[in-house]
C-alpha cells in the first residue's frame, strides 16, 4: 500500500513538472515611445517695395519762365473726366464740385498756397465759363445757328431738308417737325460739350484761357488736370529671393531651396494705386510752363504694410514605422522569441519641409477690392508729391 502511494505521488509530480515545462516564457510588452515634438523656425519679412515711377523723371519745368510768388492759379478738370466720375459716383451734378477731388483737391490747393500761389475758387471760374458759353451760344431755332452747331458730317442732312422745304416738297408743319426731331437726336456742338456720347472731348483750353482772362476772376495760371485715377488697379509682384532675410534663411536650410524656387518665391497681390497727370499753363502767353505725372500704390506709399512669413518645420517622418514595429514585437510569438533579449527600437527619422509663404500682416487680395479710405489717402499723397515739384521763384 505504501509503495502504491509513493508511485501515485511520483506520477503527480512528473505531471506537474510536465505542465510547467509546456508554458512558454514571454517578454514584457514594449511601450510606444513618445514621438518627439515638431521643431520649426520662422522668418518674417516686411516688404519695402518702391514704385517703378520716379517722380523727378516724369516732371519738367520751362527753364526760361519764372513763376512769380503771389501768382493766381485755378484748377481745371476736363469735362469728360468730370462726367465720367459723375456717372460712376452720383446722378446729380453736385458730385462735380463736391466729391470728385475731395481731400485731394484740398491737398493741391494747400501745396499751391504753401508754395506762394493764390488759389482761385473753381466754382466762380466755372460760373464765368458758363456765362461766356451762354454769350457765345446762338439761337438754335434759326436754321443758320442750328447748322453751324452740328458736326460737319450732319450738315448735308439739314441742307437737304431746307432745300425740300424751299421747293415746296414738304409743308411748313412737316419741316418744323423734322427739324425738331433732328435737334432731339443730334447733339449740338456747343462749347465744352461732347459731339457724341461715345467720343468724350476735353474742354477747349482756349475757352478756359478766355475765362481766366475775363472779368474779376483773372488767373495767371491754369492747372489743367489731364488724368486723375484714384482707384487704379495694380498687380503687385514681389520676388522674395531678393529679400536679405530670405536669402539668409535659405542659406541656413539649403534643402528647402528646391521647393521654395519651384513656385513659392513670388508674391502677387491686387492692390490700389493712384495716378495724376497735369500741366501748368501761363494764361497770358498760353505757354505750358510745367508738365508732370506721378503714380504710386498703397505699398510704395506705405499706406499698407505687407509682411510675409516663411517657415520651416522639422518633424518625425517614421512614427508609423515605429508604431508598427512595437505592435509586431508585442505579439505573443515575438514576446516569446525576445524573452531574455534586448530589442532596440528603430531610430527616429527626421524630415524638413517648407511651409509656403503666407501674408502675416497687411492686405494682399487675389482680386481687386477698392477701398474709399485708401483711395482718398493715395489721392492726397500723389497730389501733394506731384504739385510740390512746381518751382516758384524766390522774392
Image (cartoon, rainbow, N blue to C red):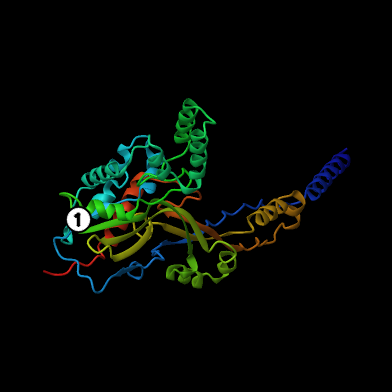
The location of residue 220, given as percent across then percent down, is 20, 59
Is residue 107 at least partly visible in the picture?
no
Along the line of sight, which residue is nearer the eye, 115 or 166? 166
Q: Is residue 223 left or right of residue 339?
A: left
Q: Is residue 150 left or right of residue 128?
A: right
Q: Residue at x 72, y 58 (%)?
A: 338
Q: Quadrant of residue 117?
A: bottom left
Q: Is residue 281 left or right of residue 28?
A: left
The location of residue 221, given as percent across then percent down, is 23, 59
The location of residue 246, given as percent across then percent down, is 46, 67
The location of residue 132, given as percent across then percent down, is 26, 45
Is residue 216 at least partly visible in the picture?
yes
Along the line of sight, which residue is nearer the eye, 344 or 191? 191
Q: Quadrant of the C terminus?
A: bottom left
Q: Quadrant of residue 139?
A: top left
Q: Residue at x 48, y 65 (%)?
A: 240
Tally of marks:
1
Q: Quadrant of residue 70?
A: bottom left
Q: Residue at x 28, y 52 (%)?
A: 208
For disc 1, the neighbor class at 10 Å (few under 14, some 14 to 19, many from 20) is: many
Label 1 sits on a secondary structure element that is loop
Along the line of sight, which residue is nearer the eye, 108 or 246? 108
Q: Determine whether 129 is above or below 265 in the image.
A: above
The residue positioned farthest toward the front in the image shown? 167
Q: Is residue 336 left or right of residue 14?
A: left
Which residue lies under the disc numbered 1?
A: 219
The residue positioned farthest toward the left in the image shown? 395
Q: Quadrant of the N terminus?
A: top right
Amino acid at each position: 500500500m505504501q509503495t502504491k502511494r509513493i508511485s501515485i505521488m511520483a506520477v503527480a509530480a512528473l505531471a506537474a513538472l510536465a505542465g510547467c515545462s509546456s508554458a512558454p516564457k514571454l517578454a514584457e510588452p514594449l511601450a510606444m515611445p513618445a514621438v518627439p515634438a515638431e521643431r520649426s523656425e520662422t522668418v518674417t519679412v516686411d516688404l519695402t517695395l518702391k514704385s517703378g515711377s520716379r517722380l523727378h523723371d516724369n516732371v519738367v519745368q520751362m527753364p526760361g519762365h519764372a513763376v512769380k510768388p503771389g501768382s493766381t492759379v485755378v484748377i481745371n478738370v476736363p469735362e469728360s473726366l468730370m462726367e465720367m466720375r459723375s456717372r460712376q459716383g452720383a446722378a446729380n451734378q453736385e458730385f462735380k464740385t463736391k466729391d470728385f477731388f475731395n481731400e485731394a483737391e484740398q491737398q493741391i490747393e494747400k501745396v499751391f498756397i504753401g508754395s506762394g500761389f493764390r488759389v482761385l475758387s473753381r466754382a466762380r471760374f466755372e460760373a464765368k465759363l458758363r456765362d461766356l458759353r451762354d454769350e457765345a451760344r446762338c439761337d438754335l431755332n434759326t436754321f443758320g445757328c442750328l447748322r453751324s452747331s452740328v458736326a460737319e458730317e450732319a450738315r448735308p442732312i439739314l441742307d437737304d431738308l431746307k432745300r425740300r422745304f424751299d421747293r415746296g416738297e414738304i409743308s411748313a408743319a412737316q419741316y418744323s417737325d423734322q427739324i425738331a426731331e433732328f435737334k432731339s437726336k443730334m447733339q449740338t456742338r456747343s462749347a465744352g460739350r461732347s459731339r457724341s456720347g461715345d467720343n468724350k472731348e476735353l474742354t477747349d483750353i482756349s475757352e478756359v484761357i478766355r475765362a481766366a482772362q475775363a472779368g474779376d476772376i483773372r488767373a495767371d495760371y491754369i492747372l489743367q488736370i489731364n488724368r486723375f485715377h484714384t482707384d487704379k488697379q495694380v498687380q503687385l509682384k514681389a520676388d522674395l529671393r531678393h529679400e536679405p532675410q530670405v536669402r539668409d534663411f535659405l542659406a541656413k536650410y539649403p534643402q528647402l531651396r528646391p521647393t521654395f524656387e519651384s513656385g513659392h518665391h513670388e508674391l502677387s497681390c491686387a492692390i490700389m494705386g493712384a495716378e495724376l497727370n497735369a500741366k501748368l499753363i501761363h494764361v497770358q502767353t498760353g505757354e505750358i510752363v510745367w508738365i508732370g505725372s506721378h503714380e504710386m500704390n498703397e505699398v510704395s506709399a506705405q499706406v499698407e504694410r505687407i509682411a510675409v512669413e516663411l517657415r520651416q518645420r522639422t518633424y518625425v517622418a517614421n512614427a508609423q514605422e515605429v508604431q508598427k514595429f512595437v505592435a509586431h514585437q508585442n505579439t505573443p510569438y515575438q514576446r516569446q522569441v525576445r524573452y531574455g533579449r534586448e530589442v532596440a527600437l528603430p531610430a527616429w527619422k527626421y524630415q524638413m519641409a517648407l511651409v509656403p509663404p503666407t501674408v502675416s500682416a497687411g492686405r494682399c487680395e487675389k482680386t481687386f477690392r477698392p477701398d474709399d479710405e485708401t483711395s482718398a489717402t493715395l489721392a492726397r499723397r500723389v497730389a501733394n508729391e506731384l504739385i510740390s515739384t512746381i518751382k516758384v521763384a524766390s522774392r
